Image (cartoon, helix red, strand yellow):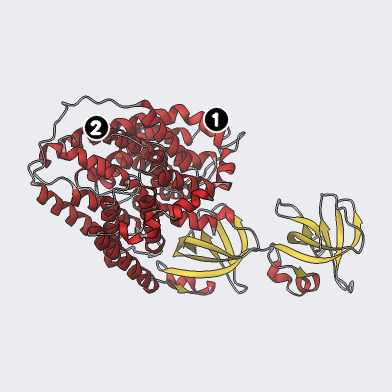
Amino acid sequence: MKNIGSIMHHKYFLNFPHILHGMRKIYFLMAVAGIVSLYFVSFLYQPERVVLSEIWKYSGKDVVVEGRVKNVAGNLITISDGNCTAFIYWENGAEVEYGDYVEAVGRVGEYGENFAIYAREVKIIRKWDENVISLPYLAENYEKFLNENVNVSGYIYSKYTGYFYLTDEYMEYRIRVYCNQSIPLKKYERVVVKAIMLYDPGNLSFYLKVCDDSHGVMKYE
Amino acid sequence: MNDFALVIIFSTAGALMGMITGLIPGLHTNNIALLMLFLLPFFEHAALYFALFIVSAAISHTFHDIIPSTFIGAPEDDTALAVLPAHSMVMRGEGYKAIVISAISSFLSIVACFLLLLPFCLLMGEPFNLYNLMEKNMAWILLSISLIMILTSKNIFHALFIFLLSGVFGVVALKIPSSFLISSSPLFPALAGLFGAPALLTAKRGDIPEQRIGEDSIKLRKRDVGSGVLSGGLVSMLPGVSAAVATTLAMAVIKEAKDENVISILSATNTATNFFVLVALFVLLKARSGFAIAIEKMIYLEKWNGMIKEPFNLFLIAIIISAIISYYLTIHIGRMVAKNISKISYPMLVKISLVIILAMIFLFNGPSGLLIFGVGVAIGMLCLEMKVRRSICMGVLLLPLLIKYFL
């Protein structure tokens, strides 16, 4: 505390303009005025926000797009806004996960026979596991979540080796959850399942699979 | 034609292209990589040779970009910190010596990179996976670099003030997509303003002394090249971090250094960064630079599994060819410029240099680039007035990165 006190009483803190005199003051004022001007100029350069189905119209231009991550393969991210999908080429693609809701800023260019956004910035607006959804909501909006990470709440209906069934509070819906971890939870206990939602064409049914470090089954708090 | 002959031809052509991009301030090998990608559909069978061309150009660029930095004070991100010492040497008649030191350091850096290749691959990839550890702790690494830079300054308050001012400038300026006639980033005008123009405007007035050619003895310290190679190696693996941060890291740990040492460290760092960017592409399958992204799109890459096989070995051959050609070209061109530079009066050189820098900025970045340049000049001059170490201005890159990683 004594050190902090002595720093706070240092002459530069007590008399900040002391370090800015003569030419220093002029350069400082020029720098501040310039930074403020640049700040306003940056608004002029704000790229247009476009829907994914229209990015082809903006080839060579900067755009802002948003959507849910459907796939991450190396530096190539596929996002969807519900109506259309688009590719985002981003060097740090490893940071985003299936199901994250992201916003990308970058230039539209060709990628093979498609268009892609060569992003200079990708912001994760909402992580896929930020909001817990209920099993009925998942069942009614399955198209939105297919092949994506989901964070779904429900009750354990029955347990078997390697999988269990998750149900809702009225036992109206039921989904199989594949999980190799041992689950120290009892039947009818309320849980949150973080897993990827997949479709099994052999059984014509959807299922959840716990298969990643970010996945798991936890007691609902 | 024989395949190996094609490797030599494309590597040589790449080295010549790197010479051109290195000598023209603001022109980057990424621009060439983009051009090659554009041409690729017309020459699909030559994808591997195009990739070799790009790697060779990237290495050659790091040899040659010291020449405009030294004689006209026009820096790039990786040579920004070398501008002032190199320009001081020009004003002492040692411009040629600066170029020779840079060329030797870059060449020795390549030799050291080859010696460290295997241990580096083992450390960063399997079995040690140091890369994952570094990636997870990137924010703290950057914070440590920043703190070392500030806390080892003579006046901590002045240094902190300049760091924050440069950082705020970076946060605002780097958001502006300032590509104009040629695709480029706002980094060039920012660095030319922070480092280039102040070096020209504040250098000792008077005529440029005749540059001594081959009269000075050159002594390089192994640790200068070594620290440059290590910094370049570490930083080349990390996402979103450029060679400029590698040079800052290398400089942060050295408190007192002569102009010659600074040039040696920065040149070694600069070359090592591009070498290890290529290595990262094969060891981690991660593209860490524009030229690496282009290569990744051009050819199929197989992850390094302990054996150096095709096409990795061809890339290493291209680097050797490029380094040898670039070494001699850099010294030859440096000698030519040094012989003639004293024929120009210093005020005239400053005017010519500023006109070239302004023209390049306008060509690459347009009117917004000129505004960025102006603000950079004000901060760079303030830094000199406050007698703060120039590397503190690297806050322009470090603060935006810290904000990105921590927020």
- Circle 1 packing at 10 Å, graded few (<14), some (14-19), many (20+), is few
Q: Secondary structure at mark 1?
A: loop
Q: Is residue B128 left or right of residue B176?
A: right
Residue A90: % across, % down: 51, 57
> For residue B100, which numbered disc appears in the image?
2
> For residue B307, which numbered disc appears in the image?
1
Q: Chain of mark 1?
A: B
Residue type at mark 2 is Val
Q: Nearer the viewer, residue B270 or B168?
A: B168
Q: Contact, CB < 8 Å: mark 1 with mark 2?
A: no
Q: Chain of mark 2?
A: B
Residue B380: % across, % down: 28, 54
User: From this viewpoint, is residue B287 visible?
Assistant: no
* Mark 1 or 2, nearer chain start: 2
Quote the CA–CA distance across marks 1 and 2.
Answer: 35 Å
The picture quadrant where one finds residue A31 is bottom left
Residue A194: % across, % down: 75, 59
The quadrant of the rendering that contains the N terminus of chain B is top left
**Share a chain, discs 1 and 2?**
yes
The picture quadrant where one finds residue B400 is bottom left
> For residue B331, which numbered disc appears in the image?
none
User: From this viewpoint, is residue B139 visible?
Assistant: yes
